[in-house]
Image (cartoon, coloured by chain):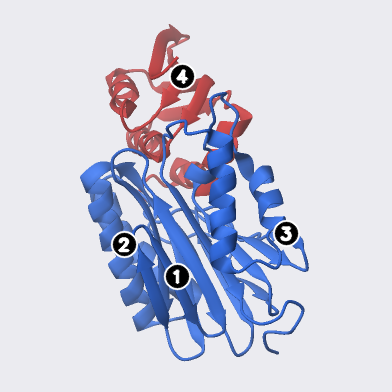
Chain colours: A blue, B red
Amino acid sequence: MKEVITGNGKIIRACGLEGSGCSLPAGQVGGDFFEFISCDERTVFAAIGDVMGKGFHAARLMETIRQMLRECVRINPHPLEVVRRLNKVGGCELRKCGAFATLCLLCYDGIAGRLTCVNAGHHPPFLLTDGKVKVARCRGVALGLLEDYLGSGAEEFFLAAGDGVVLYTDGLVEACGPGEERYGQERLKEMVRLQYGADADRMKQNILSDLETFTRGFSQKDDVTLVVMKVMGKAGERGGD
Amino acid sequence: MKGVEIRARQQKGMAILEVEGELDFSNVEQLQQEIQRRPEEVVEIDLQGLRFIDSSGAGMLLSQARHLYRQGRTMRIVRIPDLIREDLEVIGFFRVLEVIETNPNA
């Protein structure tokens, strides 16, 4: 996996996928995180999450969950098993602190072109295919709220070259401008739709620019984290069978 | 209004806590202490006036609900504004409430 790290951002290329993510804290450090994990030569994981709370404790817990996530992927890379195991080991740490964490885990198989999604209390991803945006249906209870993970299971999609996937935290859709209106999922969905054809990093930058236009510099209550992935190659080509 | 305002009253042996404003990590202890202070068997949290809740607020409500059910008591969360309901649904809040009503140690 090739990685470029810049400040709060990271750009990767792996398994025929390009990914670009960034996390913008609001005020003091928070619990938002994103992660790209290379599993083997054909599989790459992307995760986004939010640990409850603010400040040093949330940031420390977030680091613990990130490390545990990497370890869970190493032990058994089946996406549903990763989330179940993380809920067991990470959930225990979270409950000790009276906290919980949301997580959306994606696993992309670059040979099959298959994207598997498991959700634990996070906003489901947007999928951009042929200029149309679809919202994944996978749902689940956030990590640490119950002893055993409870969710709708693993959802699968087959991606073609040019298709995109967008993950975000609640800070993005709940961001407000000078009025009390939220940026909202509908505006984000439309913004994602308009990005068809752009590369992952350009998509991310365009969405963040639109958010800045909307909020007009108004200070936000929550961190904003955004991860965009795109299957490399010319739009319309199959990513695999 | 920034911050949170809590109005407490008693009705037919039940505590009713009306929560107004923005419930977040900076003020979540106010509501937590008020819930813990109530001796009634049923504690009802009325969220009609709530405009924002963050993960600390949602986590506190679930931990207090779990605590009350362990004591054989009940916590009801009522009149939830649509936007707040959507935020809570994402984390699986209502699914967790269902589970801990029947098994508070789950």
Tell me which numbered mark, 2 or 3, is placed earlier along the sequence: 2
Residue B8 seen by the camera: yes
- Identify which residue, B91 or A2, lies in the foreground: A2
Asked which quadrant contains residue A60, the reply is bottom left
Asked which quadrant contains residue A40, the reply is bottom left
Which label is found at residue A65? 2
- Identify which residue, A231 or A71, lies in the foreground: A231
Asked which quadrant contains residue A110, the reply is bottom right
Residue A154 seen by the camera: no
Residue drawn at 70 percent across, 79 percent down = A160
**Label 3 near label 1: C-beta < 8 Å?**
no
- Under circle 4, the secondary element is strand
Tell me which numbered mark, 1 or 2, is placed earlier along the sequence: 1
Left or right side of A113 for B91: left
Badge 4 amino acid:
Gly
Badge 1 amino acid:
Ile
Q: Residues within 10 Å of mark 1 (few under 14, many from 20)?
A: many
Residue A216, percent across and down?
Answer: 53, 33
Camera-near label (4 vs 1) is: 1
Residue A187, percent across and down?
Answer: 67, 44
Q: Residues within 10 Å of mark 4 (few under 14, many from 20)?
A: some
- Identify which residue, A107 or A182, lies in the foreground: A182
The image shows residue A50, relative to residue A89, as above or below, that is above
Q: Residues within 10 Å of mark 2 (few under 14, many from 20)?
A: many
Q: CA distance from mark 3 to mark 4?
A: 34 Å
Position of the C terminus of chain A, as image quadrant, is: bottom right
- Under circle 2, the secondary element is helix
Q: Which residue is mark 1?
A: A11
Left or right side of A67 for A44: right
Q: Which residue is mark 3?
A: A133
